């Protein structure tokens, strides 16, 4: 694992207000862009293998909680509440680093997956099926 855990210091990474395009794309300040619903897409990736584990969403509160705890906290669109990944299942995602794309409207959380699989189905990843040419799905 190459990243550094974000929450090891007493001061948490700061979220800055959105700046102009140059500041967002070339600057050195974290200015996440939440959509009209107040959400940003977050892809969880195994920090060691690089395997994509889940795709979820965060709102500002869940992002701040993630930074505070060092564990992934998402926003459940279906339940409309914060979702601390693994709080009930034990499948905690310890955040190693957070990457932001060029527009700062998508995140990649490089995580150390704890407690077995990342998917609520028990699979190691939510991406356990491939789409075939005829539209059928095959288990990977």
Image (spheres, rainbow, N blue to C red):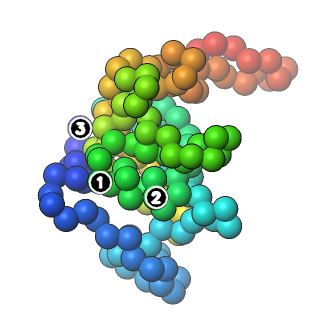
Crowd band around label 1 with a 10 angstrom C-alpha radius: few (<14), some (14–19), many (20+) = some
Q: Secondary structure at mark 1?
A: helix
The residue tagged 2 is 61
Report the residue that reaches farthest toward the top.
139
Quadrant the N terminus occupies: top left
The residue tagged 3 is 1
Answer with mark 3 or mark 2, whichever residue precedes in sequence. Answer: 3
Q: In this picture, is 103 found above or below 44? A: below
List x then y, in percent, for residue 113. 35, 29
Tell us which disc is closer to us: 1 or 3: 1
Answer with mark 1 or mark 3, whichever residue precedes in sequence. Answer: 3
Res. 134 visible in picture: yes
Tell us which disc is closer to us: 3 or 2: 2
Between the residue at mark 2 and the residue at mark 1, the CA separation in whole angstroms equals 10 Å
Q: Secondary structure at mark 2?
A: helix
List x then y, in percent, for residue 70. 29, 46
Q: Residue at x 51, y 15 (%)?
A: 122
Q: Is residue 11 left or right of residue 19?
A: left
Q: Residue at x 31, y 37 (%)?
A: 94
Q: In this picture, is 110 found above or below 101? A: above
The residue tagged 1 is 68
Between the residue at mark 3 and the residue at mark 2, the CA separation in whole angstroms equals 27 Å
Crowd band around label 2 with a 10 angstrom C-alpha radius: few (<14), some (14–19), many (20+) = some
């Amino acid at each position: 694992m190459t990243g550094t855990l974000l929450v090891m210091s007493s001061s948490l990474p700061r979220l800055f207000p959105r700046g102009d395009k140059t500041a967002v794309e070339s600057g050195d300040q974290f200015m996440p862009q939440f959509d009209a619903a107040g959400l940003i897409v977050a892809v969880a990736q195994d920090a060691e293998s690089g395997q994509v584990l889940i795709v979820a969403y965060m709102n500002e509160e869940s992002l701040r909680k993630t930074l505070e705890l060092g564990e992934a906290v998402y926003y459940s669109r279906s339940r409309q509440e914060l979702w601390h990944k693994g709080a009930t299942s034990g499948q905690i995602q310890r955040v190693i680093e957070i990457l932001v794309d060029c527009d700062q409207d998508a995140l990649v959380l490089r995580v150390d997956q704890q407690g077995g699989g990342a998917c609520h189905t028990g699979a190691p990843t939510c991406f356990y099926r491939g789409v075939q040419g005829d539209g059928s799905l095959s288990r990977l």
